Image: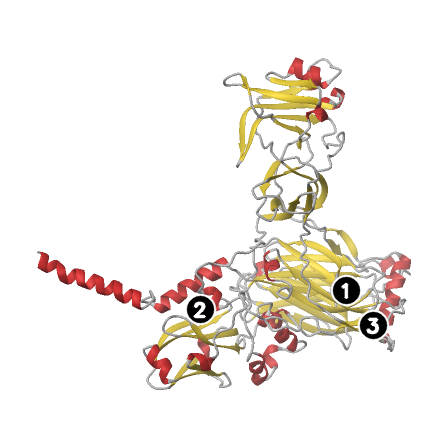
Amino acid sequence: MIKKLKPVILFLIYSLFQQGVNGQTPVNMTAYLSEKFSRYTKSVPREEIYIHTDRDEYISGEDLWFNTYLIDRQSFKPSVNSKIAYFELLNPDNRPIVQKRIWLNGGFGPGQIVLPDTLSTGVYTIRAYTSWMKNFLPFNCFSKDIHIYNAFSSRAFKEKVNSGKMVAAGINGKNYPAPNNSGLTLKVDNLKPDVLEINVVTDEKYRTANNNLFYLSIQTHGNINRISSEGITDGYTKIFVSKNQLPAGINQITVFNSKGQPVGERFIYTPDKENSVVTVHSADSSRLRNKISLDLELGNGLTTGLNSTNLSISVVPLNNNHSTTDINDYMVFGTEFGLLQRNALKDKKANNVAPEFIDSLLQTVKSNWIDWNAVLADELPVFRYQLEKDDHYLMGKLLTGDKKAVDADKFVILTYPGKIAVFQYAKTDEEGNFSFRIHIDGKDNELIIQPDEVTKNQSIDIESSFSDQYPKSETSVDSTNEPIPPYISNWSANHQVRKIYGTTSVGEPLTNVISRSVPKRFYGKPSNEIIMKDYIALPVMQEVFFELLVGVFLKSKKSGYEIIMNDPVINKTYDVPPGLFIDGVMVKDPSVIAGLNPELVEKIDVVRDKYFVGDYLFFGIVNIITKAGDFSNVTLPDYAIRLPYRVIDPVYSFVSPDYSSVSMKRSRIPDFRNTLYWNPSVKPDKEGKARIEFWTSDIGSDYEINIQGITQEGKSFSLKKTIKIKK
């Protein structure tokens, strides 16, 4: 029996020894790389935002209309992971002029801002991002330059000269070893029409150290297309991959050595072979104050789920400076590869440029998302900002009197003034940071935030939900005062006429279909609920406690007042005072309750048992609810802050005149719209058809119809068409 066991023992010892010698290299490397990649992309999702604006040029004081598309880069479908987009307009020095929080419903969100009429002529930047994207700022967000003109300002034209001139870097900022150090060189030929040719050149040292083996991976926007083990027969290994196997977009080719370490990388571009078509049927010309009907039809690969497709449409005067960039071309690079390569395609269609041009752009590119050093790391990256899928995060810092962070695990309290008490707490980290979850809605809220432990000279610093990470920028000032283009002068005059006559395209606020949370008392049903009108009037709160509240005592002391409560189980006073509230707001000083006029009190809720809210323990609760119910009868202490807060900003509808009646058509009020039509939310029917109708204005010109959209299946599309309005 012992003799039979010896070979087994020897085999186990040999196996363990071999595992130690090999540094615990996984037996199935391709499965290991795939598992690591999948784990990483699930933990570090990638969001992209595209903003479709009604125009690219504006007059200061005008309205800027836009639609937000939030896209999951891995699936290219509209993303539902974030419900809020942060929209900013930056001046030429990259400082914010306008900031808005936009609600996203299923990956879409319309918006509108008013451009201040004090803006001087220059190049301004729109940028947009989600809470999650704040982890990767300042460059990894949507950005778009627009021109704003002020014909009444003599200030010189200011233009950005170096904003965004940056090559992307990986998450951990590391580069792969140079091919000559690893003994392996990767060469890729993507210029053949039907096949991708991959050449891997290895020296003898590499082949000996890696047992004539390397691993090949091809991935496209977070999806592995191929991962294989490749044997080396000589120093020159050639691999052919059919381009039919490569999805459209930027494909990342990575070579790993036998230990699974990345030693070579290249990026190539595969154009979209599906020519998705959006057709617009309309008259090519029309007259002033005449109805125009646009019949849209989607087809050629866009026939699935069309009734859940979202389109945005603008109709604006055609000029020589209009942009040709659309949602399809933007998503080729998105934010994943920085701004340099994306800006190189500005005003170019990716599928129309020479393959050699894009290939040269991708020679030195790095992904901000898929960095194999981060993918293969033992620990996943930790990010400060979270996805705002269900709630909005309000962040801040608790500081001491000398502006130093407090210790970790200190409670900070959030309450809302109202007749229904809502309580939330947060704990500070080692730097004094804390974060609260706020329900996403369009209501005007009032927040009371205060530290749980009241000490002298504490302060609370609330962090702006908008990122303070801005790209460095220098401006070039044109002092030659070049004449403003004629159409800009006309636009400025149109805007002034509309102001004089009080005409506007801003309609009623859009109704956001947001699930509103029904507030409930955080302490549930109280032990006692005293309705003051049911009892005779008492002159002071001390008598109210004495006569009406069982087991709760308001006592005067030399230093003021105290409120104590008996444990109802053992009928013994708690060692810790109960939680005290007025209109749902926690108060630390019992004298504030003692000083209330009982005539202002509507009811009193008492919870006599110990009550847990998460980790926070109340030794009973007393909530005084006033008739006003808004905490207006109490002076806020210095250590607390009262913060008016609205999670998402209102969005208004675009309206334009209707000339169907004779009286309107003969109206002498001039119609000088610079944006003839804007609709951020057109939804085709199940057959992919939609009809849009609008009326022309009093301006004869060539107009551009610009349509951008995306289906729920991730098919994006765009179309531009010109129509002529004759005088």
Drawn side of residue 314 relative to residue 515, left or right:
right
Nearer the N terminus, badge 1 or badge 2? 1
- Closer to the eye: label 3 or 2: 3
Q: CA distance from mark 1 to mark 3?
A: 12 Å
In this rendering, is residue 500 above or below 416?
Answer: below
The residue wearing badge 3 is 157
Residue 550 appears in which quarter of the rendering?
top right
Drawn side of residue 14 relative to residue 149, left or right:
left
**Residue 56 in view, yes or no:** no
Contact flag, marks 1 and 3 (Cβ < 8 Å)? no
- The image position of residue 306, as x and y in percent, is 57, 62
- Identify the amino acid type marked 3: Phe
- Identify the amino acid type marked 2: Ile
- The image position of residue 119, as x and y in percent, is 83, 63
Q: Circle 2 — which element?
A: strand
Contact flag, marks 3 and 2 (Cβ < 8 Å)? no
> Residue at coordinates 65% horizontally, 65% vertically from top-left?
142
Q: CA distance from mark 1 to mark 2?
A: 41 Å
Which is more toward the observer, 717 or 19?
A: 19
**Label 3 neighbourhood size at 10 Å, few (<14), some (14-19), many (20+)?**
many
Which quarter of the image is occupied by the N terminus? bottom left
Drawn side of residue 614 relative to residue 146, left or right:
left
Which is more toward the observer, 633 or 276?
A: 633
In this rendering, is residue 194 above or below 423?
Answer: below
Give the number of the disc on residue 326: none
The residue wearing badge 1 is 91
**Residue 357 in view, yes or no:** yes
The residue wearing badge 2 is 224
Which quarter of the image is occupied by the C terminus? bottom right
